[in-house]
Amino acid sequence: MALLEVKDLQVYYGVIQALKGISFEVNEGEIVTLIGANGAGKTTTMQSIIGLIPTRGGSVIFDGHDITKTPCHKIVHLGMAQVPEGRRIFQELTVYENLLMGGFSQKDKSAVKEDIEKIYTRFPRLGERRNQIAGTLSGGEQQMLAMGRAMMSHPKLLLLDEPSMGLSPLLVDHVFEIIKDFRDDGTTVLLVEQNAGKSLAISDRAYVLELGEIVLSGTGAELAASDQVKKAYLGG
Amino acid sequence: MEFIETLLNGLSIGSTYAVIALGYTMVYGIAKMLNFAHGDVIMVGGYMIYLTMAGIGNPILGLAVAVLFCVVLGISIEKVAYKPLRGASPLAVLITAIGVSYLLQSTAQIIFGSAPKMVIVADLGNLTIGSLTVPYYMLITLGCSVVIMLTLSLFVKYTKTGRAMIAVSEDKGAAQLMGINVNAIITITFAIGSGLAAFAGFFMLMKSPSLSNTLGAMPGIKAFTAAVIGGIGSIPGAMVGGILMGIVEALSLTVPAIAPYTDAIEFLVLIVILLVRPSGILGKVRREKV
Ligand SMILES: Nc1ncnc2c1ncn2[C@@H]1O[C@H](COP(=O)(O)OP(=O)(O)O)[C@@H](O)[C@H]1O
Ligand SMILES: [Mg+2]
């Protein structure tokens, strides 16, 4: 059974339908990518799965639970986390406090402290800046913080909404390395990207989203080789 | 000596404003709404103190009853009047809050009549050191307020719930992504704000024993002004704004020529500060989201 099963998901903003009944699944241990142009509905998909935007039709099954109508904070407690578009770290809190917030769903205080130390080992920059106000970090550091913060809840499924956005090419490579590391450590990943080349290269499977509909799916390699994808998303 | 007395008076008025302003600013920060009925919760607290005093005669018990009642009242107001409007236009929420304000005032008038009640909380007398004479109520008000502000600051900074409050005030969606139940945080915020309003009612009755259904109206508006001066949404801002308002008030009251215009002068301070710093003294300049 799939870890995440999205069936005929429909989302509206007022009278405008942003998702026209999309279906896809993410199996345990996979990296699955949704690629699509600006405005295709990628962020809407991510936010409606995790309960931040209400759905109008369809269903979302996560780890055996029907979470279609479940409020976001409960879904997080079930083991899903998201690095939202634009990172949305808490600008006024320190790096350390942001990570603490990431561990909000964890009961054991000392385990949270240990997890934070592990994040510092993984991202030494964050350790060096642990008492710095997060709003003053560079874009790359903020992305590391957002990813570290999301991992603090030990998610089974991590949703990443355009993690490479606004980063220098070197940092983009770093971000994709981290995503692979997360997967290798046992976290299943649903990734949304405009950077189709790099994301397809690390994906087990991928879906192409166009104007609120899934128009193509396949393995990362299949999609990277498809003419349709090459023309629209790989600049060839 | 007279100047020190004036200053202490200002600090005690100001700390009362600050305690009220905390309620406005926290609710604004977290629920993004102006709780216009906040001042009237003070008045309800006043009547609870009055009832307890009339029954048992113990002011501390009166304060405890008032705090408890106001906490329940604040939570109920939020659940019944504001929660159904989550996501509605700010204007609809504001008008509802004004409606709640009138509802509380009218209910109090129906129950207790319109003639003011005298509530002698306690005859405390004055502290005299040399030529310095300070009423004890001022010192109690100041002392309690300092403890309240310190506790609240520590609570927000060092407890899980307190940090969740900061997170919700900064980004509701991101806070939910951390697993924070935003509705629960809003409830807690209303509970704290309303409990503080009861304390403010206690301070005000210690100062002047006359209690009517409009007890909270003017202090409510002034404390709201203080919250805006300090930077609405900012907890230290509410404290600074409240103290500043109190000192301006006390100073202005000592100058016979301007004393009658004290209220106007306080609101003038608001206008001047907003002209210089539109987001208030400690308010953050909002980064526009892209
Ligand atoms: N809050 C909103 N209100 C109205 N329309 C929205 C809102 N958010 C997104 N949309 C619209 O929904 C569509 C999908 O947006 P989005 O999910 O953000 O796309 P993507 O993340 O793929 O760029 C777009 O047409 C966008 O304009
Ligand atoms: Mg997007």
Image (cartoon, coloured by chain):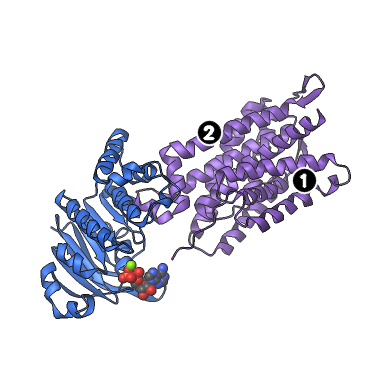
Chain colours: A blue, B purple
Q: Position of residue A30 (x, y in %)?
A: 15, 58
Single out the residue that lies furthest toward the right.
B257
Where on the image, by quarter, is ligand 1?
Answer: bottom left
Q: Quadrant of the C terminus of chain B?
A: bottom left
The amino acid on which the numbered mark 2 sits, given as a three-letter code, is Thr
Distance from label 1 to label 2 (Cα)? 37 Å
In the rendered image, residues at marks 1 and 2 fall on the same chain: yes
Look at mark 1 in the image and give the residue it sits on.
Answer: B114
Look at mark 2 in the image and give the residue it sits on.
Answer: B151
| Element under disc 2 | helix
Chain letter of disc 1 in the image:
B
The amino acid on which the numbered mark 1 sits, given as a three-letter code, is Ser
**Foreground: disc 1 or disc 2:** 2
**B20 relative position to B159: left or right:** right
Q: Is residue A34 above or below residue A130?
A: below
Q: Closest to the observer: B279 or A207?
A: B279
Disc 1 crowd rating (10 Å Cα; few below 14, some 14-19, many 20+) is: some
Q: Closest to the observer: B115 or B155?
A: B155
Q: Position of residue B47 (x, y in %)?
A: 68, 38
Q: Is residue B279 above or below residue A111?
A: below
Identify the residue at image location x=34%, y=48%: B179
Identify the residue at image location x=17%, y=80%: A228
Q: Position of residue B263 (x, y in %)?
A: 78, 49
**B146 relative position to A159: left or right:** right
Q: Is residue B12 visible in the rendered structure shown here? A: yes
Check residue B34 in the rendering and tell me which mark sits there, or answer none. none
**B54 relative position to A40: left or right:** right
Q: Position of residue A29 (x, y in %)?
A: 14, 55
Is the residue marked 1 within 8 Å of ligand 1, measured from its CB? no
Q: Is residue B132 above or below residue B247?
A: above
